[in-house]
Image (spheres, helix red, strand yellow):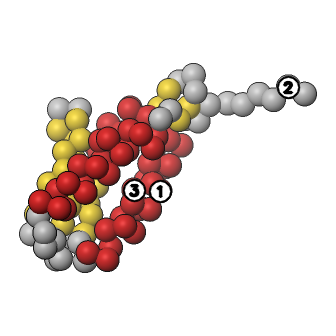
Amino acid sequence: VVASFTPLTRESVRAILQLAMQEFYRELKPLEVRMRVQGQAYEVLADLCHSAERGLENLNERLEAHVFRPVREVVQESLPVAGKTIDIKAEDNRICVEVSTLSV
């Protein structure tokens, strides 16, 4: 039996990233904090996680390194975070995480 597959497209990888971010937000919800992800941040993450040959590549490791760990660190440094917003955005093709007191 020969099984062939077509690698995921960049758009599919972006959709998977959005689902992963929604799942991660569930971890933060009990802290009564908001999370806002800038569209360009998804583009930077898609660049990191998409491979033309393989489709999705090292998603969990890259999300942990570039988003999840930095968010957890910012939350720890900013306690209490209730009522605050965590902004995940792209600057100079890098992911940046900030906490603001502004709500949307």
Quadrant housing residue 9: top right
Q: Is residue 60 above or below residue 47?
A: below
Q: Are the residues flagged by discs 1 and 3 in contact, CB closer than 8 Å? A: yes
Which amino acid, mark 3? Answer: Met
Residue at 49% across, 49% down: 15
Circle 3 sits on which residue? 21
In what element is the residue under mark 3? Answer: helix
Q: Which mark is residue 28?
A: none
Spatial separation of the CA atoms under disc 1 and disc 3: 5 Å
Quadrant housing residue 28: bottom left
Residue at 17% across, 62% down: 76
Circle 2 sits on which residue? 2
Spatial separation of the CA atoms under disc 3 and disc 2: 35 Å
Quadrant where the image shows the C terminus: bottom left
Q: Are the residues flagged by discs 3 and 2 in contact, CB closer than 8 Å? A: no
Circle 1 sits on which residue? 19
Q: What percent of the width, then of the height, locates residue 97? A: 19, 50
Q: Residues within 10 Å of mark 3 (few under 14, many from 20)?
A: some
Which amino acid, mark 2? Answer: Val
Q: Residue furthest top?
A: 53
Quadrant where the image shows the N terminus: top right
